Image: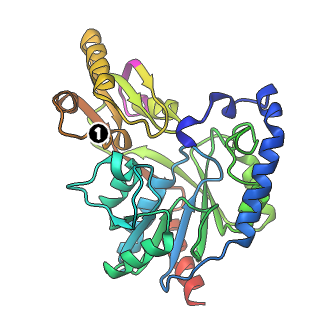
Amino acid sequence: MASEAPPFWWDRPDWRSALLWPVSAIYGLAAARRMRHARRERTGMPVLCVGNPTVGGAGKTPTAIALAQQARRMGREPGFLSRGHGGSLGKPHLVDLHHDSAKSTGDEPLLLAAEAPTAVTPNRAAGARLLIAEGCDFLIMDDGFQSARIHFDFGLLVVDAQRGLGNGRIIPGGPVRAPLVDQLRYADAVIRMGKGDAADQVVRLAARAALPIYDAVARPRPGSGVEGRSFLAFAGIGDPAKFFRTVEEAGGTLAATRPFPDHHYYTDENLADLLDQAYALGVDLVTTAKDAVRIRRASDIATRLLDRLTVIEIDVEFELPDVPERIIRDTLAAFEG
């Protein structure tokens, strides 16, 4: 669904969202019922779930990575649970960075696996057992907040401060995954990612529910090598425009931009077209780490493009530096309680 998110989802409600309202209402009722009546299996290990109230990129994956890094600093052995967006895997699969591709496991699992063991499967309980067998003692579920079939000890919702809930409508009339009130019922905290007021509705409802609200921003990792250079920037993420702004904030100049759908798998034809445009403009190429893992494969055109490609890595910076430690401790306390 995320890769097919129509642009009208992020504008003011219009005739399209109104036309789809009956379907959205049914979807919302089903999603709320699924959350309320889900039978959540306990894993025997603390579980932290990081999710979005909407489809599209709000920064949950870099947030999950930052929390895994904090868990490791606190003496834990974190592991990631992911459904993945790649091919159908018949059983829980431990991501192998040397042999797996984005096409088989999804792009986000490859990013996660660079930080900690990552299990890909729709069956989160089976994935948890696989990670525990690998020695993990702190599980972080990347997404799955609305559809979890395992018990999580701490639910964290990440909302984009610039896009918020979009038009506020539930799928398919908008980007919201389930009624917001029902989602907040299972949340323990909210992270407002970035600067802007589009997340104010979520923040108000979270405050009424006495949930902690934390602020964070996604920043380019120092040493990206972008400053003073001109680029053709391309991205296939939930909000490509956010990445294009990131390039400029890092000191780069945008000669041209090419947005693609979220989780877009780049064909050799796509890559050849990007290379031709970059050569014509006399500039280099720049993209996200998530896009880069979808390009890395054994083909001549991919090798040529990667030689000319700059990849911007993103880190999450919390307004209050102790927030990651607080979230890990709260997860452990809930598990032990």
Q: Quadrant of the N terminus?
A: top right
Q: Give the vertical position of 65 relative to 25 (above or below).
A: below
In magenta, the rendered stretch is 248-256
Read off the residue under disc 1.
224
Seen in the picture, residue 223 relative to 11 is either above or below; the reply is: below
**Toward which corner of the image does residue 195 lie, by quadrant?**
top right
- In the figure, residue 252 lies in which quadrant? top left
Q: Position of residue 224 (x, y in %)?
A: 29, 39
Name the residue furthest bottom.
337
Residue 119 belongs to the span the image colors magenta? no
User: Based on the displayed image, in which of its 4 quarters is residue 112 positioned?
Assistant: bottom left
Quadrant placement of the C terminus: bottom right
Q: Residue at x 71, y 39 (%)?
A: 174
Q: Amino acid at mark 1?
A: Ser
Asked whether the viewer can see residue 228, the reply is no
> Under tag 1, what secondary structure?
loop
